[in-house]
């Protein structure tokens, strides 16, 4: 919600107000997932894979979203694999032009009885790195910009630790076993989230990849809706749920969880999404990654930003972690377009 005569806000104030659907001086530009690029890695000498595993390098690269691009938030977790590494998954760390991945053809769990959160889960180098990075960012930018952590939801952990196909087959064949596995895996989500909050995170992204092309809205209600509502009670900062794909079939259920915000994909039109959520939660997104940010130019980015602002979307940013080869000028086009849109509104 944007009203006239709001006093100028810091980036942190702006994002936190946007998450609460309170009046803001302008629409926040928020990245709940990664905006790291190869160009930014080169700029601050913090490259993959080291920037995923060294807290100082992670902080240096993450800060460019604020210092170089002009976003109102810093989100330092570039990948979706830190917890899975700490749980014992086999990793492919790659190089600076590619994402680290879990070797999902080598699952570590085959049955629900295998699901155990190790005692050293939070002291493992790949989770401890994130916790220490957030402390660094909070010390340097904490009063000025929103620091957003990230803790993977149990559905995503199921893909990584059981393998995508075995986990989805289990969800089809044995709902009871699936629910028990999710209950056990959610402890990792909660533990890592709480550790990041204690380190200074102002909000948490919770990616839970029950994506529109793999999981139905009915399955979201069956397996995840109540658990996501539970996270709202257990994690005492605003939560930003992230699910990729076409998700209008579950947006009403997501809005009923009490989650602060939903980070939505460009496969969902801004206005149709706003019509469904009815100001019960905030929406953040949904600038297209592979076509617009990666392959087009600032004018196309500006058009998508304006479509979101015209629909009343609460916070604007990329729909997901951006391609690593994305041009910086396309990323800076997002905050520039937001400021231009508000300037035009004020001049009328």
Image: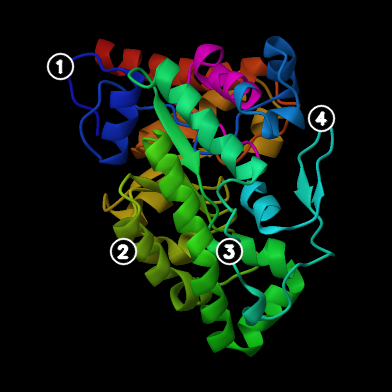
Residue 213 % position (x, y)? 65, 64
Front position among marks 4 and 1:
4
> How many residues crowd around disc 1 within 10 Å: few (fewer than 14), some, or many (20 or more)?
few
Q: CA distance from mark 4 to mark 1?
A: 45 Å
Front position among marks 1 and 2:
2
- Is residue 225 positioned above or below 134 on the image? below
> How many residues crowd around disc 3 within 10 Å: few (fewer than 14), some, or many (20 or more)?
some
* Circle 4 SS class: loop
Q: CA distance from mark 2 to mark 4?
A: 39 Å
Front position among marks 4 and 3:
3
In the rendering, which numbered label is found on residue 117?
3
In the rendering, which numbered label is found on residue 97?
4
Q: Nearer the viewer, residue 326 or 97?
A: 97
Q: Earlier in the sequence, mark 4 or mark 1?
A: 1
* Circle 2 SS class: helix
- Asked if residue 103 shows in the view, the reply is yes
Look at the image and give the residue range highlighted in magenta: 57-79
Q: Is residue 204 left or right of residue 244?
A: left
Residue 189 % position (x, y)? 50, 57
In the rendering, which numbered label is found on residue 256?
2
Q: CA distance from mark 1 to mark 2?
A: 32 Å
Front position among marks 2 and 4:
4
* Circle 3 SS class: loop
Q: Is residue 50 magenta?
A: no
Instruction: Residue under label 1, please give it.
Output: 5
Q: Nearer the viewer, residue 298 or 189?
A: 189
Q: Is residue 69 magenta?
A: yes
Residue 149 % position (x, y)? 48, 39
Q: Quadrant of residue 322?
A: top right
């Amino acid at each position: 919600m944007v009203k006239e005569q709001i006093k100028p806000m810091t980036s942190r104030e702006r994002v936190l107000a946007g998450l609460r659907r309170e009046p803001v001086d302008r629409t926040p530009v928020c990245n709940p997932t990664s905006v790291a690029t190869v160009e930014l890695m080169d700029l601050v000498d913090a490259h993959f894979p080291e920037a995923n595993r060294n807290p100082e390098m992670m902080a240096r690269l993450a800060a460019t979203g604020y210092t170089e691009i002009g976003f109102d938030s810093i989100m330092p977790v570039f990948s979706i694999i830190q917890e899975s590494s700490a749980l014992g998954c086999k990793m492919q760390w790659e190089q600076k032009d590619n994402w680290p991945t879990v070797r999902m053809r080598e699952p570590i769990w085959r049955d629900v009885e295998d699901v155990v959160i190790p005692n050293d889960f939070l002291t493992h180098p790949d989770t401890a790195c994130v916790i220490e990075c957030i402390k660094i960012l909070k010390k340097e930018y904490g009063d000025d910009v929103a620091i957003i952590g990230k803790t993977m939801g149990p559905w995503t952990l199921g893909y990584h630790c059981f393998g995508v196909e075995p986990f989805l087959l289990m969800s089809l064949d044995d709902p009871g076993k699936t629910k028990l596995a999710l209950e056990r895996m959610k402890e990792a989500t909660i533990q890592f989230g709480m550790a990041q909050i204690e380190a200074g995170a102002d909000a948490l992204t919770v990616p839970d990849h029950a994506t529109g092309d793999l999981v139905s809205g009915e399955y979201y209600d069956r397996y995840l809706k109540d658990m996501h509502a539970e996270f709202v009670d257990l994690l005492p900062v605003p939560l930003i749920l992230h699910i990729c794909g076409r998700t209008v079939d579950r947006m009403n259920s997501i809005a009923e969880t009490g989650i602060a915000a939903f980070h939505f994909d460009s496969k969902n039109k801004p206005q149709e999404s706003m019509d469904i959520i009815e100001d019960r939660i905030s929406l953040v997104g949904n600038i297209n990654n592979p076509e617009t940010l990666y392959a087009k130019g600032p004018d196309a980015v500006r058009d998508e930003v304006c479509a979101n602002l015209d629909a009343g979307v609460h916070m604007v940013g990329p729909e997901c972690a951006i391609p690593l080869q994305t041009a910086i000028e396309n990323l800076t086009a997002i905050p520039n377009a937001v400021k231009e849109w508000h300037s035009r509104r004020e001049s009328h």
